[in-house]
Amino acid sequence: MCGISGYINSRPESDADLRLIARRMCDALAHRGPDGDGLWIDAAAGVVLGHRRLAIVDLSPAGAQPMLSTCGRYVLVYNGEIYNHLELRDTLGGVAWRGHSDTETVLAMFTRHGVQATLHHLVGMFAMALWDRQDQCLVLVRDRMGEKPLYWGRLPAGDLVFGSELKALRAHPRWQSQVDRNALALYMRHSAIPAPHSIYSGIRKLMPGSWVTVRADGRTEQGFYWSLGEVARRARASAPGWSDVDAADRLEHLLSDAVEGQMLADVPLGAFLSGGVDSSTIVALMAQRSSQRVRTFAIGFSEIGFNEAIHAKAVARHIGTDHTELYVTAADALNVIPKLPAMYDEPFADSSQIPTALVAAMARQHVTVALSGDGGDELFAGYNRYVLAERVWRRLARVPLPARKMAARAMLAVSPGSWSALGRPVLALLPARARQHHIGDKLHKFASSVLPMPDQAAMYRALVSQWQDPTVLVLGSQEPHTPLHDACFDPQAGSGVEQMSLLDQMTYLPDDILVKVDRAAMAVSLETRVPLLDHRVVEFAWQIPMHQKIRAGRTKWLLREVLYRHVPRHLIDRPKQGFAIPLHEWLRGPLRDWGEALLAPQRLQAEGFFDVRLVRETWRAHQYGGRNFHNLLWNVLMFQSWLEATERP
């Protein structure tokens, strides 16, 4: 795991000047690679490649980057791991290996097979920058599922820049920044900025599974070597039809293979363990393949209404891991907030970023690599919203749209506080775990986001959006279309759940979940690996029918069947919990003054990004009106905090 950066110069500069700029860009990523650095410069071509190293495999100088191919044609910097690189070496007879790093393997594959052909053989996570000295072109590549980040674009002065994080690009002396208001509108809807957009005009994120080639004359070519949409389409056309037992056997084999490959490291390795289905499955399979006790890590919140740490501890005890848990206070979590703008380097507002940062920092005290269970909900239909949305829409679709709109208006005419008061006597009769807090807010969201929607795709877009019409909030913006906007649920393209799952795999997973974990972990120089996102597991998940994902109301059915072979059901079967914090309460309490300062009317007016009246009304309604708008406000607050930390002198 590392940080990469570089640029192609737009004007003649001396080797010394090129080196100085490269050093500044590279040093901005020191947290991603504290174990060493390296530069490669071709002054004649105006090309600079920079690398910060977090040594994981082959800790010797033989694994250092930038690395040249033995033929002298290619120069490579990359961030990530190729888990099957030893298998690939076995196919490359006649190579005189200098070390045992995966970087050297990839270069040998490029030399033997060419760049495009090699990409199809790689199993791993990666963001690569390759300079082809023969063809005088730069090739940028990103892994299939978007685990590793890569930004790129042209500065107004003409320089082409790239890097693992935006802070490397901002370190370039000719950097000129301009917030992209259209991308800001997307952020206000999604709590993250979806690829290929970034917060800056002219700077883009490379899409998962894609490559871009920049030639010496400035011409740019782009393409995909792997497409999730195409994977889903092919799977629907030729589903194998495995029995339950055969499907479970195959999933266990594929996951075991992925876990074993991702345990390859020359440094201490462990895993995050929440006690849920996904992380417990990964840890159980790790324990089967490890000659020593697996290190596992969990955090608990004693002051919050739920606590996953007790479930993680029970699973760890059964599997027999070397388990470390840390109970943190609200003050510990609040102390993370000032660090978030630098950590995420781009507006990002998934509030579970706070506990993620805490568990990453705790794990880094013991290990350099941690496996996680991310991806299980998206691949195996684990989100409750999939089942609920499908069930609700089947009923709503029978009611004419005008009638639904009329019902929505009637529900919205009653205040959330009044709805909550009306429902309180009924809720008191239910078990504590079944009681819905803020019932009035939930009914208002149902009335605005579900009832008046013309089709299921529009309903799902509304359900997963924060600000429903962000162009009203963000002044001068036009919201670009994303797969979520373009979605039109087609009965020929599978069930509604399948189409919701595909949308999440294309958007929410790479743009939110993987960003959250990568930035939080790399801020403390911790490499995270995600076995469930091995592309072979992803492709398999699309080959199994929905009744092997959801059965009798139980989500992730097949993944559970694999886990039950290793962990008793009673340790796993419980209501799903999120990795959450009481943000709604904090914004009325310890974060109130902080929020008031960031949302001061004069400040908002001077900056000119938001409709001041709308922001202030939302803030007041949350503070005094009995409304629960913490998600909407967190999006605005995280942008304001980023703007203060990043853009102001």
Image (spheres, grey):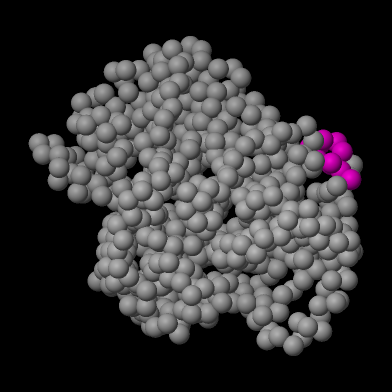
Query: Which stretch is magenta?
Result: 604-613
- Residue 464 against residue 3 in the figure, above or below: below
Membership of 612 in magenta stretch: yes
| Residue 6 is at least partly visible in this image | yes
Residue at position x 55%, y 17% in the image: 158
**Which residue is at 44% across, 62% downward?**
546
The one nearer the camera, 575 or 648, is 575
What residue is shown at x 41% (from left), y 30% (from top)? 223
Side of 572 where 178 appears, left or right: right
Q: Is residue 405 above or below residue 130?
A: below
Residue 234's spot in the image, x, y percent?
36, 46
Q: In which quarter of the image is residue 450?
A: bottom right
**In the image as oriented, which residue stretches furthest toward the left?**
94
User: Compared to 25, does 540 lie above or below?
Assistant: below
> x%, y% of residue 188?
70, 46
Q: Measuring 53% from the left and 27% from the top, which residue is drawn there?
A: 153
Is residue 285 depicted above or below 164 in this figure?
A: below
Q: Quadrant of the C terminus?
A: top right
Overall secondary structure of the magenta section: helix
Q: How many marks?
A: 0
Q: Is residue 72 left or right of residue 26?
A: left
Give coordinates of residue 399: x percent, y percent.
Answer: 71, 60
Foreground pick, 182 / 242: 242
Asked whether 303 or 14 is in front, the reply is 303
